[in-house]
Image: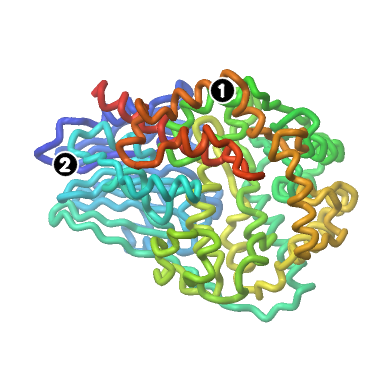
Amino acid sequence: MPGIYGYVKNAKEYGSINSMSTILHHHKNFIKENNYEDNIFAASHIHLGNIKHHKGLFFRNGIYISIEGEQYDYSNSIFEDLMFNAYMENNLDYFLNKLDGYFNAIIYDSINKKVFLISDRYGMRMLYYYYKDGDFAFSGEVKGLFGLNFVDNEIDSNQIDVFMDLGYLLEDNTWHKHIKLIKPATILEFDITSKELTQRYYWKWSEINYSDMCFDEAVDRLGDLWLKSVEKRFSPNSNIGVSLSGGLDSRAIFAAINAIYPDSDGVAYTFGIPNCDDMRIAKQCVAQTKWTHREFYLTDNNWFEPRKDRIWFTDGMFNLKHMHGSEFLDEISELVKINMNGYAGDAILGGGWLDRIPLDTYPRDEFMSIFYGDYVHKCNFVDAFYDIKKIEPHLFMNRVRRFTNMGTVNSLTNIDQRKPFFDNKIVEFIYSLPDSYRQNNSLYSSMLLKFFPKFYKNIPWQNTGKTIDKKVSSSNTMKIIKKIKRIPFKLGLMQDSGYTNYIKWINEKNINHELHKILNSKNALYSKYTNIDFEVKYLNTKFKGIRNYDEKILRATTIEIYLQKLNILKTTE
């Protein structure tokens, strides 16, 4: 989603805010806000019109404010008014510290000649900035910065290996050396006069206080908080839907909505292979309610072509393999305007990583290498932001923010998203508790069974094939058995019950031919930045034992298509 964008003018500049707008206005459904411009600063905003319903801009007493996203604490207030009052009262840090929302913002003080970029507490609304030799610009999408001639868009070749090995980039890095992602819970301040850029956190994980609440009490407290989180993000009178899978998280949202509004009749939708587990389980859930269920089918014929442009929309930082459902965004946006997103529920409430990490301790290289591999040294675990005896916050800001979150970014071209699992009170509560409460999904499952039994008592979890009141062995023997059972699917000999089948799809004749054409090193642009021949190493060797390279093949394809589209933009400027 383009969001907010702009720049501080300089003597070298001949690009304009209109050039940025042209690049960013890549969907006909976008609404462009009126430009703000004076002799030293220019900015604008492109949005979907679901949250903000007009093209007007906010400028009062010399202060320009533009916000992408929303807050959930002041239902009867205009967000820009709240931000303006906090800034004018010199109370901005305190206001943001308490604010629950999913947003980023720009404040331009034309009197004091300062620009402030602001991220939400968890930094899930992406905002990128350029700062080099005193020049400063920002954009909700990296590509928007290329509308300005002074922006140096040099590729950072070090990121090739990171993306190929991890599937995402780390910390604040992008494909470009001088373009960075704003940190979470941040106020980034640019002084136009001195050309100095400073960053400060308005909230840190260390502000969470530990609790000695017993397990049973925690179950009740979590259930209450969960209902409140969903309630303040959902209205039965709005065009809000639920992307419903066979997992626990989207179902938890769906169950909460139907507990709060039992007579609501919205739209839930599921995408995947016909008759996959996700489709089957989602149908069972919807059958308990008055809602409508829509199914969207992924096939070997419809997945690849629509995702090429999506690589550009996500600035090359999201592997096209994981763009599930983006093929149907135009259709889905006719049904719903806002999606209630189960984003990261398994990690926050389910403790999905706790069987791989030490409990209640600070992140260190030896603990984090299982996630970041050879790139663990590129991670900043000693940042004051992470001063809490929990490993997961760093994973949230990297594995979740830089990978999982890109699925949300991909959909924001058509549908706005709300993420109730990242409710401030829920996160603060969960990380005040001992990690052991969440081991083996204990706290989460107990809450779901107690508060929403009709959705969980008799309907299985796609991950295990069993209902969550049934114990599933986590022994090494069971893990080995599961891996052995997966071999026929990895080899493409049997149809998986999952919602995709990329192993089979990349071997379809037309797709395979296209992939060879894209990755041929003689013509490929990626060859300028790495000595690895992706076609030879991965595409020509699809299997190594029982290991399939579909993930690597499509990561490489993502890189190459992004570079090609970037090259087209350069040649047309």
Q: How crowded is mark 2: few (under 14 residues within 10 Å), some or many (20 or more)?
A: few
Q: In this view, does 122 lie above or below 281?
A: below
Estimate the x, y position of residue 182 in percent, counting from the top left. Answer: 37, 52
Q: Name the residue under label 1.
A: 511
What is the CA distance from the residue labelled 1 to the residue labelled 2?
Answer: 49 Å
Q: Is mark 2 on a helix, strand or loop?
A: loop
Quarter in which the C terminus is drawn: top left
Question: At x 38% / y 64%, what residue is drawn?
Answer: 201
58 lies left or right of 210? left
What type is the residue that disc 1 sits on? Answer: Ile
Quarter in which the N terminus is drawn: top left
Q: Is residue 76 above or below residue 429?
A: above
Q: Residues within 10 Å of mark 1 (few under 14, many from 20)?
A: some
Q: Mark 2 points at which residue?
A: 40
383 lies left or right of 48? left
Res 58 seen here: no
Res 453 seen here: yes
200 lies left or right of 167? left
Tell me whether the residue at label 1 lies in contact with that at label 2, contact meaning CB atoms closer than 8 angstroms.
no
Estimate the x, y position of residue 127 in percent, counting from the top left. Answer: 38, 46
Question: At x 20% / y 31%, what residue is drawn?
Answer: 15
Estimate the x, y position of residue 503 in percent, counting from the top left. Answer: 64, 34
Q: Residue 254 appears in which quarter of the rendering?
A: top right
Q: Which of 88 and 469 is in front in this view?
A: 469
58 lies left or right of 167? left
What type is the residue that disc 2 sits on? Answer: Ile
Q: Compare marks 1 and 2 and give the one earlier in the sequence.
A: 2
Estimate the x, y position of residue 328 in percent, counting from the top left. Answer: 61, 26
Q: Is residue 226 above or below residue 294?
A: below
Q: Is mark 1 on a helix, strand or loop?
A: helix
Q: In this view, does 511 lie above or below 203?
A: above
Closer to the eye: label 1 or 2: 1
